[in-house]
Image: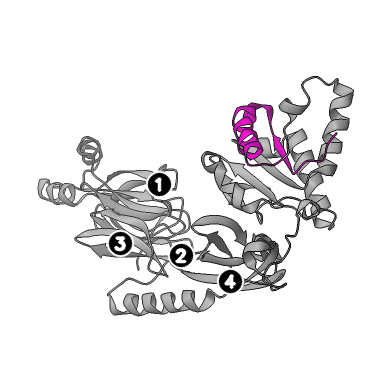
Amino acid sequence: MADYDIFISCKSEDYEIAEKVYSFLKDNGFSVFLAPKELRKMAKADYMDAISIALDSAYSMIVVSSKKKYLTSEYVKFEWSTFLNEKLSGRKTGQIMTLLENIKVSELPIQLRKYESFTLENYENVLPYLEKPKKTAKKLKPKNGGKKDVNNSINDAAIGSEVHVKTDIPCRVLRFNKELMTAQPDVDNLIHLKKGSHEFKFVSIENEQDNYSQVYTIKDECEILQVNLTEIRDARLAKESERIAEEDFSPFREGLTRVEKNRKWGFIDKTGKVVIAFNYDDAKDFSEGLAAVKLNGKWGFIDKTDKVVIPFKYKDAKQFSEGLAPVRFIDKNDWKKLVASTVLFTPLVYSSILLVGVWGYIDKTDKVIIPFKYVVAEPFSEGRAKVAKLNFKRGTIDKQGNFTPDE
């Protein structure tokens, strides 16, 4: 079997697009191995032998995948991991690249993230990154009395270089707006690029506002590219802290604080980022993972993802404390039953209490733990809560609703 410039690895489901890549590369002068093209007439026993021989002889590899799971299927993983081991050991010096569809570079197996990646629809873009094995390259005779002429010698810019990216915080590395890798601190983030000028962009994973672009010229066989995003991040945080300090914000509770904008309430984090949009008529601070918010005249509770945990059905609500939250009841039909069983009410008292509602306590599943029978109710603290009964007698209750009057 002949030596190959390029080995194409793919799942059988991707043969159609892989054959387009195969034909494109063949038209550009490369010898290419693709299983359905080369092995159709072979027996199964010969098939595996041929794969091993092709892998051993191939100078470069292109992994084609339309789904994330195909990359770790048995044969595809065997092929690219075998090639990669040869490359990392120094026995191979060619490229390994991925052609992907609906797969982010960050979703690739970690071994492949540091190498060139392109979308399947733009497979032609692989061409500038491919080269023939060095043994096949022929050096042209110099002209002008032996002086070096870049037009008549092997182009140094076509020779690959190892680029080691060193970053202070986790970031995405883009070249000409194409993502190359996710770089991590204290890791050898290695990519292979041709010599020459490249436009890089570095984007912090923590916050995309922290980024910068740089044109970098690769000259040597081994280059170190230092990425410094800490200063950019610290400058942004300082500005946001100054802006937050100038506003009349509530204290941060559980990492968030409520903010009013255009008569609507939402929540921001300590960097000033809007975490929960300004959608609510009123809001109270987070406590035990939930916040009371008001919408269309009624109160309910949301979590930090803005998911409604307790529906909007209460006249008022206060913060959770020790697993319980005071809420004010507004169902007039149940009010009538309550008043009918309470001889202490005069019509005047009944009317005034009906207007303001009555308080009880719920847990985080919206289950009523202490019935609605108080005109005043405060959050629990150290196992007890201050309340005032329907006859306006004040005292405290425990979590079972046992009342102790004030002295």
Q: Which quarter of the rendering shows the N terminus?
A: top right
Looking at the rendered image, the disc whose residue lies closer to the viewer, 1 or 3, is 1
Residue labelled with disc 1: 307
Give the structural element (helix, strand or loop) at label 2: loop
Residues in magenta?
Answer: 1-30
In the rendered view, would you say 189 is above or below 57? below
Instruction: Please give the name of the residue rendered at 60% of the width and 52% of the height, measured from the top-left corner.
Output: 128
Question: Looking at the picture, which amino acid does disc 2 mark?
Answer: Glu
Which mark identifies residue 217? 4
Q: CA distance from mark 4 to mark 3?
A: 78 Å
> Which quarter of the figure has residue 290?
bottom left
Looking at the rendered image, the disc whose residue lies closer to the viewer, 4 or 1, is 4
In the rendered view, would you say 104 is above or below 216? above
Question: Looking at the picture, which amino acid does disc 1 mark?
Answer: Lys
Residue labelled with disc 3: 394
Give the structural element (helix, strand or loop) at label 4: strand
Going from the N terminus, do you reach mark 4 or mark 3 first? Answer: 4
Going from the N terminus, do you reach mark 4 or mark 2 first? Answer: 4
Q: Is residue 102 left or right of residue 190?
A: left
Q: In terms of depth relative to the viewer, which is nearer, 238 or 346?
A: 238
Residue labelled with disc 2: 254
